[in-house]
Image (tube, helix red, strand yellow):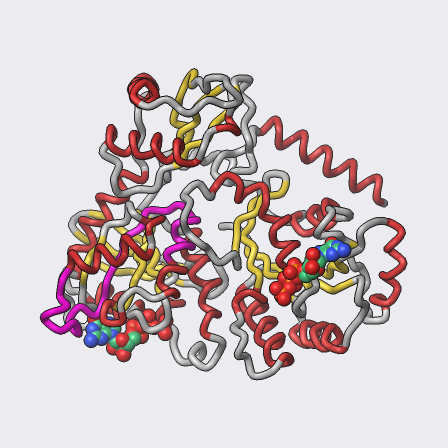
Amino acid sequence: MKPVVALVGRPNVGKSTLFNRMTRSRDAIVDDMAGVTRDRHFGEAMWEGRPFVLVDTGGFLSNDADSFAAHIRAQVEMALEDADHVVLVLDGKSGVSYYDRDLVDLLRAKGKPFFCIVNKIDGERHEIALTDFYALGIEEPFPVSAEHGYGFSDFMDALTEDMPLEDEGNDGQPEGPIRVAVVGRPNAGKSSLINRLLGEERMVVSEVAGTTRDSVDSLVEYGGKTYLFVDTAGIRRKGKVTHRVEKYSVIKALQSLERCDVALVLLDASEGVTDQDVRVAGYASDRGCGCIFVCNKWDLMPPEKKDVKRMKEELAMEAKFLGYAPVLTISALTGQRVIKLFPMIDKVYEQYISRVGTSHLNRIIEDATARTEPSLHNGKRIKFYFASQVRTSPPTFALVTNYPDAIHFSYKRYLVNQIREALGLDMTPIRIKFQERSGRTDYSDKRSKPSPELLRKLQAKRRSRKRRNR
Ligand SMILES: Nc1nc2c(ncn2[C@@H]2O[C@H](COP(=O)(O)OP(=O)(O)OP(=O)(O)O)[C@@H](O)[C@H]2O)c(=O)[nH]1
Ligand SMILES: Nc1nc2c(ncn2[C@@H]2O[C@H](COP(=O)(O)OP(=O)(O)OP(=O)(O)O)[C@@H](O)[C@H]2O)c(=O)[nH]1
């Protein structure tokens, strides 16, 4: 499981700029579905083969927070509760402020170690500004320019030093039971659904320790198959969370999404599709797991509104980017259709882990490109030489071409749709990446892994840099 890193700091210190720099390599590859305005409060990042999830806690807070002090306090609470690493961002240009002191005191009081960045140090000559910050008692502030990159790699080296390398042996071929996450905005009915599932007489249920602190998963046997519902304890644990900032649960949701094959994106059908639902769906889409929209509280729908087709249309419109997710209407309260989740999970999973032979794939691409050619690039034809499936979970295809950067996203979408149609993959996310003929692989994609040889080189580089710094 990837570690979660949270950025905290008062407004305007450069958190968004830093966030963008830290996630940049990744975003360029992932966001191929245009047309969604996504909040950028969390993202995936990778540094020298070490993947992590980045959260900009500032972004989670609404403007109507009682006061500024309450606002930053809530940020810190959130970050400390669930993040594995906390990064405090300070502003080297405007100097130390009262709020910075407050933040540092808060972090100290919690006793959790944190990294400290002094941002807007745009070059060596600005480092003099650091002296102010020593007064805060911070031993090793990292001078960084989020905008220009100064000091950035030293900071990233330190931050990721103890993080695990991307799973070396795993090419995405899953083992063991199907892992299912239940996510959704507060009050959608997550715990009701989990309780209903675990309480069914026809199921054999046992609890197993999850991979994070205090987390408990549930193994469920149904129809001769085993399913692992991740972090069921986290969902059922109540009370404590309710008075805290509502969006707090986002980090938890991200963590369960990281660990699942199929996500049940739960929403309260009686309230329609809300922005918050779309946001949760966006996280699931970014993660690239299989997804099912589960429209709960169907029992509350007045007869004239009990229209599955309309519900599907609404979802298709509001969350276009998850067009491949099937929709099921249920009632966790009465148990209506809940059992139908299992065959649906099976179907999505089957597609999620599917593989296609190379010659079959190449025929599909040849046909598709013959039918509709990509537009010219500077007057030259874009050619596709070879295609192969490089991963499953989700199915990921590499296409070797003469101009990998020149292919328009609409053409990429066309190819994705052609593959979907030809292979009957209508319920799983699909990824395509374009590669140059030389076979260079961009390992900044979290799901393609660097070769052991490359990793060794990177580690050697890291070690020598450290020696230099001593
Ligand atoms: N000179 C300089 N300016 C920077 C740097 N990083 C950010 N800035 C500027 O600082 C301002 C604030 O940056 P943001 O990234 O929006 O700050 P933020 O902390 O996300 O602010 P909120 O969204 O209000 O929380 C912008 O005008 C940036 O251009 C830097 O490294 N050097
Ligand atoms: N009528 C009806 N009510 C439901 C259904 N499912 C859940 N509820 C109710 O909706 C409320 C919220 O349900 P929970 O299961 O606590 O929702 P949750 O998503 O776990 O909520 P958080 O812990 O706040 O994230 C409770 O009052 C439930 O009884 C349903 O299918 N029909």
Q: Position of residue 201 (x, y in %)?
A: 15, 64
Residue 365 sits inside the magenta stretch: no
Q: Residue at x 51, y 40 (%)?
A: 446
324 relative to 216 in the view: left or right: left
| Residue at the limit of the structure toward the left, as seen here | 303
Q: Is residue 360 left or right of 77 when viewed as pictured? A: left
Residue 294 part of the magenta segment: yes
Q: Is residue 110 left or right of residue 314?
A: right
Q: Picture quarter containing residue 303?
A: bottom left
Quadrant of the image containing the C terminus: top right
Q: Nearer the viewer, residue 318 or 87?
A: 318
Q: Quadrant of ligand 1?
A: bottom right
Residue 259 coordinates in the image, percent (x, y) = 41, 51
Given residues 115 and 413, the one toward you in this image is 413
**Quadrant hosting residue 126:** bottom right
User: Is residue 366 among what the camera can see?
Assistant: yes
Vertical comparison of 40 with 171: above or below:
below
Residue 146 placed where, x, y %? 71, 52
Magenta-tinted stretch: 281-307
Residue 86 at least partly seen: no
Callout count: 0
x and y, in percent, of residue 202 in the image: 14, 60
Q: Is residue 244 left or right of residue 312?
A: right
- Quadrant hosting residue 366: top left
Q: Residue at x 48, y 62 (%)?
A: 251
Q: Is residue 401 above or below residue 85?
A: above
Give the vertical position of 404 relative to 465 (above or below): above
Asked whether 74 or 315 is in front, the reply is: 315
Q: Looking at this rendering, what residue extends furthest in the front direction?
A: 379
